[in-house]
């Protein structure tokens, strides 16, 4: 059996509008002057890391809770949309012989689960490992949780993601990575050895997984 783990923000869903709107309101609330051009770089990594850097370590988790209260409470969470071709990518990989599909994300576990249902693609995902504060927060931790919980070997997996956080997290647990070129990543500066393929579209991912991971 081979396992294909997908990132959420920037890989499955374009969460730019909702996240960036609430980021601005959070930074404004804490009087942190942050260039809005940087906001896309904050989509994907744990919010606590971003807020620790720009708001302060002592206020980071408080700021996370403030962000979450607005993001969910004011329904900014629903400004997300699936990238074109992603529903096909998830379903076709799920249907391949010898493939188990999963999502490994630094989005809060419950939010990822809810949005996968809302998008109508939850049935294509067999394993979900999302962020749980003070338990697993980094990409490395959410991947390691999935490996441990389901007794999976890293060499039997590939991570599909769009940023250096996906690539580096996969590398730390010993996992190969497919780099998606449609999200929020700084692609030209990602040269990690565990990147085995660069996918321009979700259909490229389908073909790579079919040829290199599935049972013939």
Image (cartoon, rainbow, N blue to C red):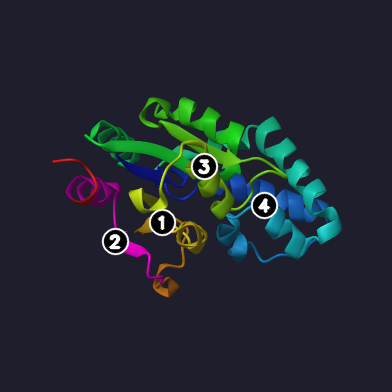
- Is residue 206 one of those drawn in magenta? yes
* Distance from the alpha carbon under mark 4 to that under mark 2: 28 Å
Residue 3 in view here: yes
Q: Nearer the viewer, residue 89 or 73?
A: 89
Q: Nearer the viewer, residue 195 or 85?
A: 195
The residue at which mark 2 appears reads as 197
Q: Residue furthest right?
A: 58
Q: Are marks 3 and 2 in contact (CB under 8 Å)?
A: no
| In this picture, residue 72 sits left or right of residue 117 | right
Residue 118, placed above or below residue 132: above
The residue at which mark 4 appears reads as 47
The residue at which mark 3 appears reads as 148
| In this picture, residue 15 sits left or right of residue 50 | left
Residue 92, placed above or below residue 153: above
Say whether disc 1 or disc 3 marks the residue closer to the N-terminus: 3
The residue at which mark 1 appears reads as 175
* Distance from the alpha carbon under mark 1 to that under mark 2: 13 Å
Question: Which residue is found at the position 78% from the left and 49% from the top?
Answer: 61
In the rendering, at what x and y percent does residue 47 appear? Answer: 67, 52
Q: Secondary structure at mark 2?
A: strand
- Is residue 147 one of those drawn in magenta? no
In the rendering, at what x and y percent does residue 84 appear? Answer: 33, 42
Say whether disc 1 or disc 2 marks the residue closer to the N-terminus: 1
Say whether disc 4 or disc 2 marks the residue closer to the N-terminus: 4
Question: Which residue is found at the position 81% from the left and 60% from the top?
Answer: 57
Q: Nearer the viewer, residue 207 or 118?
A: 207
* Distance from the alpha carbon under mark 3 to that under mark 4: 24 Å
Q: Secondary structure at mark 3?
A: helix
Neighbourhood count class around disc 1 (C-alpha, 10 Å): few under 14, some 14–19, many 20 upward: many
């Amino acid at each position: 059996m081979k396992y294909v783990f997908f990132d959420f923000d920037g890989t499955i869903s374009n969460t730019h509008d909702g996240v960036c709107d609430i980021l601005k309101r959070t930074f404004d609330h804490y009087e942190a002057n942050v260039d809005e051009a940087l906001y896309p770089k904050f989509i994907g990594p744990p919010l606590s890391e971003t807020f620790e850097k720009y708001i302060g370590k002592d206020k980071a988790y408080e700021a996370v809770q403030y962000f979450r209260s607005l993001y969910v409470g004011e329904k900014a969470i629903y400004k997300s949309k699936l990238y074109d071709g992603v529903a096909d990518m998830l379903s076709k990989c799920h249907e391949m012989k010898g493939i188990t599909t999963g999502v490994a994300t630094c989005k809060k576990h419950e939010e990822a689960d809810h949005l996968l249902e809302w998008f109508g693609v939850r049935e294509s995902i067999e394993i979900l490992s999302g962020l749980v504060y003070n338990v697993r927060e980094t990409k490395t931790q959410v991947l390691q949780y999935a490996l441990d919980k389901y007794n999976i070997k890293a060499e039997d997996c590939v991570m599909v993601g769009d940023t250096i956080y996906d690539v580096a997290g996969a590398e730390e647990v010993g996992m190969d990575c497919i780099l998606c070129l449609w999200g929020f990543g700084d692609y030209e500066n990602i040269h990690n050895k565990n990147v085995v393929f660069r996918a321009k579209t979700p259909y490229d991912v389908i073909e790579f997984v079919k040829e290199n991971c599935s049972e013939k």
